[in-house]
Amino acid sequence: MAIQQTVRPPLPHVERPISDPPRPQRSRRRVASDYGLMGVALLAGPANVIMELSRPGVGHGVTESRVESGRIDRHPIKRARTTFTYIAVANAGTDAQKAAFRRAVNRAHAQVYSTPDSPVSYNAFDPELQLWVAACIYKGGVDIYRTFVGEIPEEDADRLYREGMSIGTTLQVPPELWPPDRAAFDRYWQESLDKVHIDDTVREFLYPIAVSRIRGVRLPRAIQQRMESFNLLITTGFLPQRFRDEMGLSWDATRQRRFDRLMSVFGAVNRKLPRMLRQFPFNLMLWDLDRRIKTGRPLV
């Protein structure tokens, strides 16, 4: 009697734990020297913003922000520059660049705190909320690398995790708050999912980000709809199911296959690019940061 076995597709990268062992590959690649600084990572940017703002303290802190110049809904290009610079500095910045950027962020964060009318209590200097933001960025970085480059060898994964602590410490996260190893990070992540909740206010704020809609920019309706549908596929594909559910975004096996094929194409192109183009715009952001420091211009 033949025994039929159900062959299940592999778990999508966004659902894999950080400590998940490397999957078999046709050829083993060395970890890229520009790990964390690939421009193709920008495709996952909207999804990471959604993950960060899924904690009510972060979500309402952003939607109610008094820092007019830094609001992503009103100044998306400027906010994107600040975010890209932060990631570049955290991954490859000098101690002087990190210190300068931290001071600038601290000045902006000093204006972000809840009021008696806020639905939740929050403060931008809350290290727990800062840890959550840093954890989202770190996990997103691992998902991006697995998607566009390949598996991370065990001997490199622990080192990269330790280096990833700078994503948090570049802000206000004390080093001792960063989970000590990848297994501890996975436990922290699972426990933190219980604190995720996106209400109607934050969801309405996030949807234009999910489809990469820029305020004040309108294209012919048919083109706008096609672009937003394409952008939403990418954003939803980079979200773990827990966050899709909070946003009310549909996903199924057909969409997953489309997403996987699309990412394979982007990954193949990314691997062929020369280093300078592969790192754009993060390399430009580091250059721009130095220029702003020297000329006394605002960093955020």
Image (cartoon, rainbow, N blue to C red):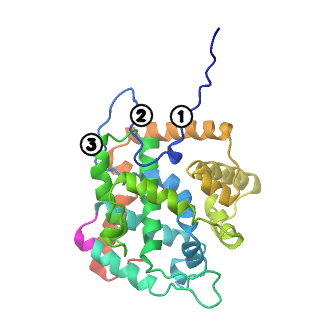
Q: Mark 3 points at which residue?
A: 155
Identity of the residue drawn at 57% across and 66% down: 195
Q: In this view, does 151 lie to the left or right of 225?
A: left
User: Under tag 1, what secondary structure?
Assistant: loop
Asked which secondary structure carries label 2, the reply is loop
Tell me the kind of residue under disc 3.
Glu
Q: Mark 1 points at which residue?
A: 10
Q: Which residue is drawn at 37% across and 49% down?
A: 277
Q: Residue furthest right?
A: 221
| Quadrant position of the N terminus in the picture | top right
Residue 253 image-quadrant placement: top right
Task: Return the residue at label 2.
Answer: 23
Q: Is residue 261 left or right of residue 185?
A: right
Residue at coordinates 29% horizontally, 38% vertically from top-left? 30
- Amino acid beneath label 1: Pro
Residue 41: x percent and y percent? 46, 52
The span shown in magenta is 93-97
Residue at far bottom of view: 116
188 or 63: nearer the viewer: 188
Question: How far apart are the alpha carbons under marks 1 and 2?
Answer: 10 Å
Rendered location of residue 234, percent (x, y): 59, 49
Circles 1 and 2, Cβ within 8 Å, touching? The answer is yes
